[in-house]
Image (cartoon, rainbow, N blue to C red):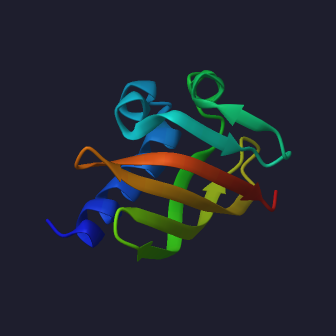
Amino acid sequence: MSDLETLTALNLDYVASVQRSDTKRFDEILSDDFLNTNPDGALVDRAGFLAQIAPKAKITDLTCHDVNIRVMGDFAIIHARTSYTLPDGRPGSGRYTDIWARRDGKWLCVAAHVARNQ
């Protein structure tokens, strides 16, 4: 697979893993030095992110849109929009930026930033 195809698949895995609260998959695709900026501005490390993801997701129907993947050698940035359903049935939306690095021949997510409109 090309880098673009690999990162496209990893992006879909990442979003699906959020919806499924799949810490096992995140354990495979996050770098040891991963950092995430939460919608409230808090910066959490890998362990903190995994702890946040572990409880069953409160949102449903999480989908990514307008995915823009930019590959720059052993580095890639993914920008996308999200839509989902909130627990009370209202629609929600947001954006994310994920930063990936090829380390020892494997793409790993090294950082993420999440913004929510609702």
Q: Is residue 78 left or right of residue 3?
A: right
Report the residue that reaches farthest toward the right. Answer: 40
What percent of the width, then of the height, locates residue 86? 71, 48
State the count of labels: 0
Q: Residue 71 is drawn in which quadrant? A: bottom left
Q: Residue 45 is drawn in which quadrant? A: top right
Report the residue that reaches farthest toward the left. Answer: 1
Q: Is residue 12 above or below residue 21?
A: below
Residue at left offset 81%, top offset 62%: 117
What percent of the width, then of the height, locates residue 77? 50, 67
Nearer to the camera, 90 or 20: 20
Residue at left offset 14%, top offset 65%: 1
Q: Is residue 57 left or right of residue 93?
A: left
What percent of the width, then of the height, locates residue 30? 44, 38
Q: Quadrant of the C terminus?
A: bottom right
What percent of the width, then of the height, locates residue 2? 18, 70
Q: Is residue 77 left or right of residue 44?
A: left
Q: Is residue 36 above or below residue 25?
A: below
Q: Is residue 70 left or right of residue 111?
A: left
Residue at left offset 41%, top offset 54%: 101
Q: Is residue 86 above or below residue 21?
A: below
Q: Is residue 48 above or below residue 103?
A: above
Nearer to the camera, 48 or 71: 71
Nearer to the camera, 99 or 81: 99
Residue at left offset 56%, top offset 70%: 79
